[in-house]
Amino acid sequence: MSDAAKQRTARPKREPAAPAADLQRFVNAGRLAAGTAPDALAALGLAQHDVAFLCQLLEEGKSPTARDVREAAEGARAAVARAVGRMAAVLSLARPRQADITPLDVREVIGAALFDLEARLAGFSLSAELGTAPLAMAERGGLLQTLASLLLDAADNSPPRGRIAVTLQTLDGHLVVAIEDEGPAPLSPESLPDREGTPLWLCRNVARSFGGELAVSQGNRGGRRVTLRLRSGR
Amino acid sequence: MSDAAKQRTARPKREPAAPAADLQRFVNAGRLAAGTAPDALAALGLAQHDVAFLCQLLEEGKSPTARDVREAAEGARAAVARAVGRMAAVLSLARPRQADITPLDVREVIGAALFDLEARLAGFSLSAELGTAPLAMAERGGLLQTLASLLLDAADNSPPRGRIAVTLQTLDGHLVVAIEDEGPAPLSPESLPDREGTPLWLCRNVARSFGGELAVSQGNRGGRRVTLRLRSGR
C-alpha cells in the first residue's frame, strides 16, 4: 500500500450517526410537513379546481376560449409549483447527510435551514443578525437539523406575526447562535432540554455529538432564548 | 353540584400526552413523507408537464385541439390527485389525537394504520390475519402511531416486494399484534427497543404509557418479529 493510500485509510473513521440524529431529521420533516401541508393541499385544491374546469368544458363539448384555458392552466401551474416547493423542503429535511465533523461556515448553514423552512416561517417577522465569524467545528447535517428544530420550536411558540430573532456571535473563542421568540413565558418543563423525548432534548443530544452545547433561558422578547455554542474551527 | 355533574368531573383526568407520543407522530409523518414524497413529486412533475404543454400551445397562439387539451387536463387531474393522497396521509399521521385510554377494536386501528401507509406499503406483499378478538384497553392515537411506526420499520427493513405479515391473536387473556418482515438477520442493536432514540424505543415508551408491552425476536421469515401485547378491555 502506498503512503498516500495509507493516509487515506488512516483518516478518522466516520462515526455512524447517532440514533438521535436519524430521529431528529424525521421529526423535523414531520413537523415541517404538518406546518406546510395544509397550504400545499390548498394549492393543490386550486389546481384541481382549475383542471376540473378544463375537463368539464371539454366533456360538455364546448370549445374553450383561449382566455379560459390560459387562465385555468396558468392557475394550475402556479398552484402545483407552490405544492412542489413545500414538498421538496420536507424531503430536503428528511434526507440523511454525511456525518463528518469539519470546519463550517455557520452563516451558510443558518441560511440553508432558513431556506428549507421558508414556507413555515413566512407568517413571522424574522430577523437574522449574522456578524462575521470564524469557521466552527461541527457536523453539517446535525447542525442544519438542530437549527431547523430550534426554528420550528420558535415558530410553534410564537404568536401570529411574532418576531423570531437569529443571531450569530463570537464569544470567548466559541461561536454562539441564539434563537429567540416571543412565545409564552415562563418556561414550561417541556421547553427545557432535560425533558426526555422532546425536540429540544434531541437537539442537545445531536449538538453534543459534534462538540456543541445547548442552553435555554428566558429571553428579552418575552419568550424563550436558546443558545447553541460551537467550537471554533481555527 | 348534582350527582351527575360530580360523576362527570370524577372521570379519570386526561393525562397530558407523553413527549414520546408527540415525537412519534412527527417521526412517523416525516418517515412517511420521506418514503412517499418522491412519488408525489414525480406525479406533480407530470402535472407540471401537462399544464406547461397547455400553456405553451396557448402562448404560441395555436388553437389546441380538444383531444390534446383533454388528455393533458386528464393527466394533470390524475397526477394532482395522486399527490394529494400522499400528502393527506402524511398530515393524518402528523395530527395530534385525543389521548384517553378506552376499550378499542384493534382491527379497526390496524386498518387505519394500513390506510395511512397505503402508498408506502404498495411495493410489498402484505398479509393481515386478524382473527376475531375482544376489545383492548389502549389509547387510540398512541396505538395507531405505534402500529404505523412498526409498519414503517418493516417497510424499511424489507427487500423490494418482500413479505410483511400482520397478525392479531388472543393469548393468555392479552391481545397480541405481531408484525414480521423478511429484513436482514441477525438483529442489529439498532433494531432492539433498548437503543435509546430509535423509533422502536419510542414505540415501547408510548406502548407502556397505555399499558402495552413490546418484544422483539428473530422471526420465521428471516427478519424481525415485533409483538405488541395489549391488555384486554373486558
Image: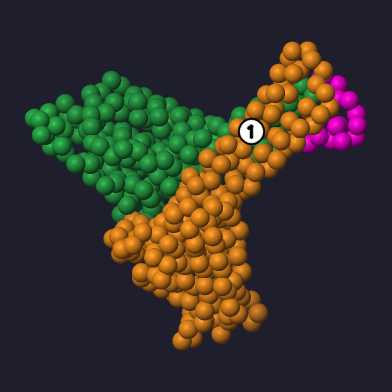
Chain colours: A green, B orange
Q: Nearer the viewer, residue B192 or A215?
A: B192
The image quarter in which residue B131 lies: bottom right
Look at the image and tell me whether residue B93 can be seen: no
Q: Is residue B55 above or below residue A119?
A: above
User: Which subunit holds the residue at mark 1?
Assistant: B
Q: Mark 1 points at which residue?
A: B46
Q: In this view, does A124 lie above or below B156?
A: above
Q: In this view, does A203 lie to the left or right of A138?
A: right
Residue appearing at x 91%, y 32% in the figure = A61
Please check the rendered image and state whether residue B123 is part of the magenta-colored stretch, yes or no.
no
Residue sitting farthest toward the bottom: B172
Please check the rendered image and state whether residue A63 is part of the magenta-colored stretch, yes or no.
yes
Residue appearing at x 36%, y 59% in the figure = B184
Look at the image and tell me whether residue B71 can be seen: yes
Residue appearing at x 28%, y 20% in the figure = A132
Q: Is residue A82 left or right of residue A228?
A: right
| Residue A53 point in image, percent of width and height | 81, 33
| Residue B61 point in image, percent of width and height | 78, 13
Q: Is residue B147 left or right of residue B208?
A: right
| Residue A87 point in image, percent of width and height | 54, 37
Q: Nearer the viewer, residue B162 or A132?
A: B162
Q: Give the SS element for disc 1.
A: helix
For badge 1, the amino acid type reads: Leu
Magenta stretch: give its range: A49-67
Q: Is residue B172 left or right of residue A55?
A: left
| Residue A143 point in image, percent of width and height | 32, 37
Residue sitting farthest toward the right: A61
The image quarter in which residue B194 lies: bottom left
Residue sitting farthest toward the top: B61
Q: In which quarter of the image is the C terminus of chain B?
A: bottom right
